[in-house]
Image (spheres, grey):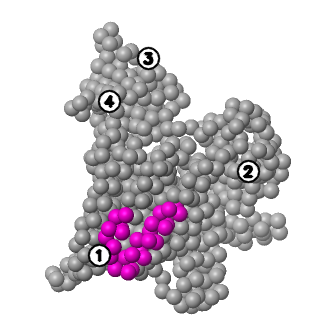
């Protein structure tokens, strides 16, 4: 048992997941745990001492995870006893986010019934003289509401998203109902606003917004076209502060320290820089995971201990989940942990196999490919299927663009951080009248950094419009689970040790358990309608919630898809923002027949917008509107 902390993490996270999906089936969950225990006892005669300890450790962690998640879900929010009532709450703004119709605030209450975080919707009326920033103390009066559930399968799940932030209640208010008590702005928010204020006039609004999103993971200032393009071509990870960003900061600081970079004091400075940068990004799940792993790496160097990336990732994941178990459902946490375990497990195994092949062939070209191409392939093997499932898009260009953009990030992030330091220095010297000394350097570096950011954004937008980037429903959940079980089993050292020792019964038991889990778990959680690998969440008839108007989706027994009307609104693109995600989540990649009852906006516009994103093979309209058939889809 070489990595007991890894077993603890997987056991704890499995317990959290089981309780999250089985909140109403807790007796069945504990029965399942009991059956697993009995199975291990049945296999005890074939198990070695280390395997017995590993099984006991995993089961203990599983139970601890279940108890932790159950305790978190059982906590009640006092404000929910006052639903649809007006309440006054005083608190500190943790995070602010601009939206089309106003502003959203994450608030930590300081007075009132609640002491847990709240999500506040502030409707815009144009009457507020100023908007609150992170760190400001505010008082607000608004209506208490519950977080919304997904309106359609595959649509945004506000309840789950807010749970990962520690929020159970929502307050809906207006700008005139928000009163600012104290303007002691949070340091990180003040820093970001200062940079945005100084960079915007020099590099332009689009480049500045892209750089802020790239540097701090705040995509609010980015243009929607750029954001969608990066998600389509598989570069969305560059817009979230991840291990790449924090690692580059750590490496840049260590490079600046030179030969002293391995001393105790230098390691403390590097750790502080990594944690500070993660704080600027709001301590997101991916940034926290990376910062914790860097701290573990530095502590290991100071104590002259070897660094194991798998163990470090497991420790970081355990710390995050023990603090907030609901983070297990955060997409940032899932993608970040998957990337960490993929790089530390799959990459070494794939590199070893490629090197052996190159040695057998005695080919230098294959050895070069093993050193340079295999890391890119391993990243795509790990991240490709889950990104296709989440973003419902596959790009054949991602394999070539990822290394190019990662190399660009290696240049862009240190330059942007240097530019940020110069910006702060200019602000400090402005009061003394000495800012003219560094201003030429600031202007030169800002223009060059903005041009580099513009080049990356233009490259992403160009690649997103090239052939080879297409929408997809992703993998069925059962096949996705089986894929990752096979991938990580193939990469596991334990699997090959069992093969060498001839533990065939254990191997067969593991494979059988994996196949059963891939069949049963999606069906048990409601993401598939049958315990089959290829099954999606399937309903014969769905009345799709499109907001305004009607939309009915029919699936025939032979798999044909029919849409009756498509809704429509002047405030959003229903076809692109509502129908497309819903259909892709259901595994639908084309509409066989679309029927429009009449050509009013709230019935037909959604079909028009959907036709730009997905193939509609046949269109049926009311006979009296036939003369408009050639114009409605223009």
Identify the residue under disc 2: 115
Residue 613 seen in the figure: no
Against 605, residue 138 (above or below) is below
Marks 2 and 3, the one that precedes in the sequence: 2
Q: Using residue 399 as the reference point, say whether residue 248 is left or right of it.
A: right
In three-dimensional space, the C-alpha distance between marks 3 and 1, rounded to whole angstroms, equals 70 Å
Pointer 4 with pointer 1, Cβ within 8 A:
no
Mark 1 highlights which residue?
46
Distance between the Cα atoms at labels 2 and 3? 48 Å
Which segment is the magenta one? 38-65
Q: Earlier in the sequence, mark 3 or mark 4?
A: 4
Name the element at disc 3. Answer: loop
**If the image is split into quadrants, where does the C terminus sit?**
top left
The answer to whether mark 3 and mark 4 are in CB contact below 8 A is: no
The residue under the point 26% across, 29% down is 556
Q: Position of residue 433 (x, y in %)?
A: 81, 67
Task: Name the spot of residue 227 as percent of width and height, x first.
Answer: 48, 49
Local secondary structure at mark 2: loop
Q: Which residue is mark 4?
A: 540
Q: Residue furthest left?
A: 361
**Residue for point 38% across, 15% down:** 598
Identify the residue position indicated by label 3 in the image.
600
Query: Alpha carbon of mark 3 to alpha carbon of mark 4: how far?
Result: 26 Å
Mark 4 lies on a secondary structure that is loop
Q: Can residue 183 be seen from the camera position used here?
A: yes
Q: Residue at x 49, y 42 (%)?
A: 156
Measured as percent of width and height from the top left, residue 158 is found at 55, 42
Q: Nearer the viewer, residue 514 or 145?
A: 514
Q: Earlier in the sequence, mark 2 or mark 1?
A: 1
Q: Earlier in the sequence, mark 3 or mark 1?
A: 1
Name the one closer to the observer, 24 or 79: 24
- Marks 2 and 4 sit apart, C-alpha to C-alpha, by 44 Å
């Amino acid at each position: 048992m070489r990595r007991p902390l890894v077993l603890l993490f997987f056991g704890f996270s499995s317990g959290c997941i089981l309780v999250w999906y089985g909140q109403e089936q807790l007796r069945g969950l504990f029965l399942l745990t009991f059956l697993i225990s009995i199975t291990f006892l049945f296999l005890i005669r074939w198990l070695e001492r280390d395997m017995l300890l590993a099984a006991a450790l995993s089961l203990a962690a599983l139970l601890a995870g279940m108890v932790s998640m159950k305790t978190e879900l059982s906590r009640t929010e006092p404000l929910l006893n006052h639903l649809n009532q007006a309440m006054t709450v005083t608190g500190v703004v943790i995070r602010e986010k601009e939206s089309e119709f106003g502003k959203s605030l994450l608030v930590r209450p300081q007075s009132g019934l609640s002491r847990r975080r709240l999500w506040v919707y502030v409707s815009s009326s144009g009457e507020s003289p100023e908007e609150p920033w992170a760190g400001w103390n505010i008082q607000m009066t608004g209506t208490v509401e519950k977080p919304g559930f997904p309106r359609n399968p595959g649509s945004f799940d506000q309840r789950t998203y807010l749970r990962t932030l520690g929020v159970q209640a929502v307050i809906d208010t207006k700008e005139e109902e928000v009163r600012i008590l104290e303007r002691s702005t949070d340091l990180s928010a003040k820093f970001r606003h200062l940079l945005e204020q100084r960079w915007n006039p020099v590099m332009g609004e689009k480049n500045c917004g892209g750089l802020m999103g790239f540097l701090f993971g705040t995509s609010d200032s980015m243009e929607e076209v750029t954001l969608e393009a990066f998600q389509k071509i598989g570069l969305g990870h560059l817009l979230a502060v991840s291990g790449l960003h924090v690692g580059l900061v750590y490496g840049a600081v260590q490079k600046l320290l030179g030969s002293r970079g391995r001393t105790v004091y230098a390691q403390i400075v590097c750790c502080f820089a990594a944690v500070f940068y993660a704080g600027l990004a709001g301590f997101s799940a991916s940034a926290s995971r990376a910062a914790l792993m860097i701290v573990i790496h530095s502590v290991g160097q100071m104590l002259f201990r070897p660094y194991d990336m798998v163990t470090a990732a497991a420790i970081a994941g355990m710390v995050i989940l023990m603090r907030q178990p609901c983070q297990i459902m955060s997409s940032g946490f899932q993608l970040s942990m998957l990337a960490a375990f993929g790089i530390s497990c799959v990459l070494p195994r794939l590199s070893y196999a490629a090197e052996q092949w190159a040695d057998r062939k005695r080919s230098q070209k294959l050895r070069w490919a093993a050193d340079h191409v295999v890391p890119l392939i391993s990243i795509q093997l790990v991240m490709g299927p889950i990104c296709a499932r989440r973003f419902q898009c596959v790009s054949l260009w991602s394999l070539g663009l990822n290394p190019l953009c990662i190399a660009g990030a290696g240049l862009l992030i240190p330059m942007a951080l240097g530019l940020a330091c110069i910006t702060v220095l200019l602000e400090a010297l402005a009061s003394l009248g000495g800012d003219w000394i560094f201003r030429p350097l600031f202007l030169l570096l800002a223009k060059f950094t903005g041009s580099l950011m513009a080049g990356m954004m233009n490259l992403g937008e160009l690649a997103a419009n090239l052939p080879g980037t297409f929408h997809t429903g992703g993998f069925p959940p059962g096949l996705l689970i089986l894929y990752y079980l096979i991938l990580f089993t193939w990469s596991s050292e334990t699997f090959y040790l069992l093969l060498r020792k001839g533990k065939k019964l254990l191997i067969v038991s593991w494979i059988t358990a994996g196949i059963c889990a891939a069949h049963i778990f999606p069906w048990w959680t409601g993401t598939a309608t049958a315990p089959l690998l290829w099954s999606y969440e399937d309903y014969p008839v769905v009345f799709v919630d499109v907001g305004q108007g009607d939309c009915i989706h029919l699936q025939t027994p032979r798999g044909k898809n029919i849409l009756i009307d498509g809704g429509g609104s002047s405030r959003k693109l229903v076809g692109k923002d509502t129908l497309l995600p819903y259909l892709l989540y259901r595994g639908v990649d084309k509409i066989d027949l679309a029927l429009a009852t009449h050509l009013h906006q709230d019935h037909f516009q959604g079909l028009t917008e959907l036709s730009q994103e997905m193939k509609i093979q046949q269109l049926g309209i009311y006979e009296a509107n036939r003369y408009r058939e050639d114009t409605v889809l223009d």
